[in-house]
Image (cartoon, grey):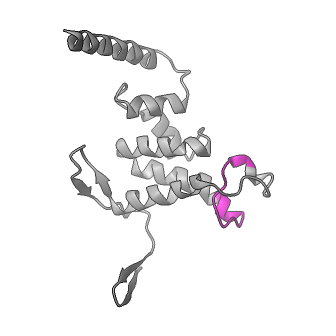
């Protein structure tokens, strides 16, 4: 009986949240991604449209969730464009690590490195290799995205050395 009550309340809350997200254009990118990841809304098309143009309103610390939402939505091209537009600028500046915040570009002595620097590498690997979970029972789907790849260099550590190859 309590399980039914909680399930009913959960469905009512979900429906209320869906109405809020559908009827409001002023909801931020962060909230839309979180709602999508929680299955409250069915798509993040407006976020993906901005991402396709290289526009990203997220702070770098939140980009993990933005990238996770774009990945869940199958928006690989948009994910790669955001990584290029935000993190590519850091590399053009000569950074050897990704900045903790976008504002580090104005003050390069501050916030130059944090664990958040691993975010683009993690998602690029998944985006290009196509390796991703497709359900909670842990099967893996491999569907490589090669459209924007110009060159791939791979090193595989082996017991007696390293096997390395490059494709162009």
Q: Is residue 55 visible?
A: no
Residue 92 sits in quarter: bottom right
Q: Count the marks: how many?
A: 0
Q: Is residue 115 magenta?
A: no
> What's the residue at 47%, 29% (across, down)?
32
Q: Is residue 26 left or right of residue 140?
A: right
Q: Nearer the viewer, residue 61 or 24?
A: 61
Q: Is residue 101 magenta?
A: yes
Q: Residue placed farthest to the left in the image? A: 1
- Above or below: residue 153 compared with residue 105: below
Q: Position of residue 56 (x, y in %)?
A: 58, 42
> What's the residue at 66%, 57% (across, down)?
113
Q: Nearer the viewer, residue 15 or 55?
A: 15
Report the span colored magenta. 89-103
Quadrant the C terminus occupies: bottom left
> What's the residue at 63%, 58% (across, down)?
98
> What's the residue at 24%, 55% (across, down)?
140
Quadrant the N terminus occupies: top left
- Above or below: residue 89 compared with residue 7: below
């Amino acid at each position: 009986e309590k399980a039914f009550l909680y399930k009913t309340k959960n469905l009512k809350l979900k429906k209320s949240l869906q109405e809020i997200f559908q009827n409001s254009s002023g909801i931020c990118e962060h909230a839309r991604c979180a709602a999508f990841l929680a299955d409250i809304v069915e798509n993040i098309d407006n976020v993906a449209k901005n991402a396709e143009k290289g526009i990203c309103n997220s702070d770098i610390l939140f980009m993990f969730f933005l990238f996770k939402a774009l990945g869940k939505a199958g928006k690989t091209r948009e994910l790669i464009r955001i990584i290029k537009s935000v993190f590519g600028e850091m590399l053009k500046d000569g950074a050897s690590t990704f900045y903790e915040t976008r504002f580090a570009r104005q003050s390069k002595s501050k916030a130059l490195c944090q664990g958040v620097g691993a975010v683009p590498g993690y998602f690029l690997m998944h985006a290009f290799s196509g390796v991703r979970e497709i359900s909670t029972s842990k099967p893996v789907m491999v569907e490589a995205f090669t459209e924007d790849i110009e060159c791939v260099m791979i090193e595989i550590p082996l017991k007696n050395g390293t096997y390395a190859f490059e494709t162009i």
